[in-house]
Image (cartoon, rainbow, N blue to C red):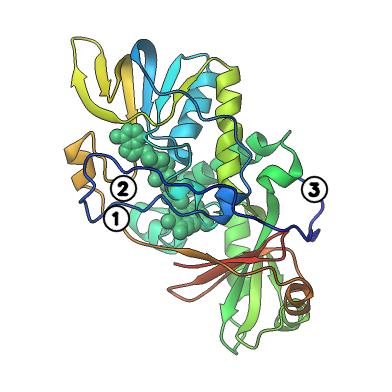
Amino acid sequence: MKGLYNYERIKIEPKRETTLKLSSTNDDKRAMKIDTDTYYTQTEHRANLRSKLYGTVETDICIIGGGLAGINTLLEVSEKNISAVLLEENRLGSGASGRNGGFLSAGYYVPIKRLEGRLGRKYAQDLYRLSAEGIEIVRRRCQNSPQTEIDAEPGIVRMSWGKKENNLKAQIDYMNSIYETKLTYWSKSKVAERYSSKKYSDAIFNPDAYQLHSLNYIHKCAVDAESLGAKIFEETTAISITKRKSSYIVCTNNGHVKANTVVICTSACQNHVNTKLYNAILPIGTYVLLTEPLFDRLTEAIRSPYAVSDSRRVENYYRPLRSTQILWGEE
Ligand SMILES: Cc1cc2nc3c(=O)[nH]c(=O)nc-3n(C[C@H](O)[C@H](O)[C@H](O)COP(=O)(O)OP(=O)(O)OC[C@H]3O[C@@H](n4cnc5c(N)ncnc54)[C@H](O)[C@@H]3O)c2cc1C
């Protein structure tokens, strides 16, 4: 990871017309559309499409789904010398993982004080530490990647929405002392120096949070896992899982995987191999937008390289890209 604020005037052309077929349950209203050409697919660096699975393979662990959950699991077990096979119905990262905001930070959607209230401080600290460990793992995995591929840049600013300065210093002190974060305070004037917006007052800066090209991150993890012996099959749908005495048979559209353990990483995708799990998931729709290249207009309005979120309940988040575009979303 290196130099911030290093925008390049690159022109992004649509790389290909991507029309990937959705499988069997096409009528499912919860299905995500995956045929959209995105910023991420236009700037992806990937190996050739891997082959489909034909015939039968045997492995210790069969992972279903090639998003962030699946690919990180694959790399993690491969690093521990456990044999693993990953099945991806479409292309790696074609779900939410390869088309998201690219924000990476520790913690959970539930505010930390509420976690403490529910679970006690000690447990909340353990949970927070676990998520911080996740950041560290991703950071390590991004290393040795050419800067332009994953574009992992540290620093997320959380703006206070509104005119009044908030009691952020107390929040920062609390987080730094109880959760060992390294948050710093940005006064209203510091924020105004860097962002031409009247909507913000003061802010919290988190140097241990990142923005990254999540699709290229997935591709790098995939190559790293393969170099350790893992096998990946794309355009391969897991259709059913059958338990045998001490193993499982995962049936796909053209073959089978015999595995001791199966890890289902299919998120809210419509293609369910486990109905109980599928019914326990509540899918939500959320979107990101991309502006046109803004060239000097970007640096006139935003004089800072960091990713930004704000303090509203339904927050806006955005990040300036090298191409001088802004990737923007709402949560
Ligand atoms: C617009 C948007 C912005 C977001 N922004 C952020 C953000 O900035 N930061 C953040 O932390 N989170 C963000 N998220 C959430 C984050 O992207 C998801 O939580 C995460 O990507 C989920 O990863 P996953 O691997 O569980 O699922 P997915 O990425 O959905 O991967 C599941 C994979 O399983 C495959 N699959 C499904 N069924 C089968 C089958 N039967 N056989 C084989 N393969 C199958 C799918 O094709 C898919 O590739 C965002 C989400 C969205 C939609």
Ligand 1 within 8 Å of the CB at mark 1: no
Q: In this view, does 229 lie above or below 116?
A: above
* Rendering coords of residue 272 (x, y %): 24, 39
Query: On the picture, is 323 further left or further right than 24?
Result: right
Label 1 SS:
loop
Dividing the picture into quadrants, the one containing residue 54 is top left
Q: Which residue is label 2 attached to?
A: 268
For badge 3, the amino acid type reads Lys
Q: Earlier in the sequence, mark 2 or mark 1?
A: 2
Q: What is the x, y in percent for residue 231?
A: 47, 19
**Residue for badge 1:** 283
Can you tell which quarter of the image residue 161 is in? bottom right
The CA span between labels 3 and 2 is 35 Å
Q: Which residue lies furthest to the front in this view?
A: 17
Q: Name the residue under label 3.
A: 2
Cβ of mark 2 under 8 A from ligand 1? yes
Identify the mark nearer the N-term, 3 or 1.
3
Residue in the image at 70% along x and 82% along y: 188
For the residue pair 297 and 54, the one nearer the viewer reads as 54
Q: How far apart are marks 2 and 1 (CA)?
A: 6 Å
